[in-house]
């Protein structure tokens, strides 16, 4: 029972991380230093998606799933859950396009905030 609950918690954390990487730049509207955590998260997401690094959250979830007597998944989180549900049987170049789109969206967010001088210190 513990392993099953732990695996589900990691699954939710994994999804939250993906949402954060995708839209976390918007947090800079409210908190001027949110980029300090968001930029490394984006870089980590790109390493995993484009260079094929193993995500430690996938490894951890598979560990808990096997401890619960369930099968883990061989592919990464995105391929197993998100891509299968949202983008069934898409070719690899579509993954690359989506990654570039993600970079463009976040690039626009940061460009807009920079132009608004949103990163300036209000004290000085």
Image: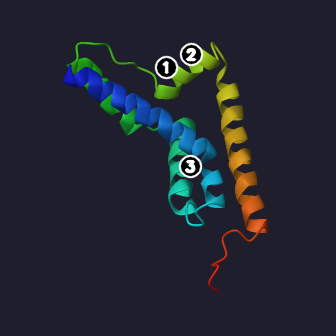
Q: Which disc number belongs to residue 42?
A: 3
In the shown orientation, is residue 72 left or right of residue 109?
left
Q: CA distance from mark 1 to mark 3?
A: 20 Å
Q: Are marks 1 and 3 in contact (CB under 8 Å)?
A: no
Q: CA distance from mark 1 to mark 2?
A: 6 Å
- Return the residue nearer the eye: 51 or 73: 73
How crowded is the residue under tag 2: few (<14 C-alpha within 10 Å), some, or many (20+)? few
**Residue picked out by circle 2:** 84
Residue 54 in view: no
Tell me if I can see residue 38 in this picture: yes
> Is 42 drawn above or below residue 29 in the view shown?
above
| In contact (CB < 8 Å): disc 3 and disc 2 | no
> Which of the two labelled residues, at mark 3 and mark 2, occupies the earlier sequence position?
3
Q: Position of residue 15 (x, y in %)?
A: 49, 33
Q: Is residue 5 above or below residue 25?
A: above
Q: Quadrant of the N terminus?
A: top left
* Residue for point 65% across, 18% down: 87
Identify the residue shown where x is 49% and y is 37%.
Answer: 16
The residue pinned by badge 1 equals: 80
Q: Residue at x 72, y 46 (%)?
A: 105
Q: Residue at x 65, y 29 (%)?
A: 95
């Amino acid at each position: 029972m513990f392993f099953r609950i732990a695996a589900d918690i990691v699954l939710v954390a994994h999804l939250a991380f993906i949402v954060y990487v995708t839209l976390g730049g918007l947090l800079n509207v409210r908190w001027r230093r949110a980029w300090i955590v968001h930029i490394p998260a984006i870089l980590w997401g790109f390493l995993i998606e484009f260079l094929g690094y193993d995500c430690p959250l996938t490894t951890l979830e598979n560990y808990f799933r096997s401890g619960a007597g369930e099968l883990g998944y061989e592919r990464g989180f995105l391929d197993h859950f998100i891509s299968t549900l949202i983008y069934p049987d898409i070719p690899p170049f579509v993954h690359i396009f989506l990654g570039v789109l993600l970079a463009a969206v976040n690039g626009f967010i940061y460009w807009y905030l920079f132009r608004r001088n949103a990163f300036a210190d209000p004290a000085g």
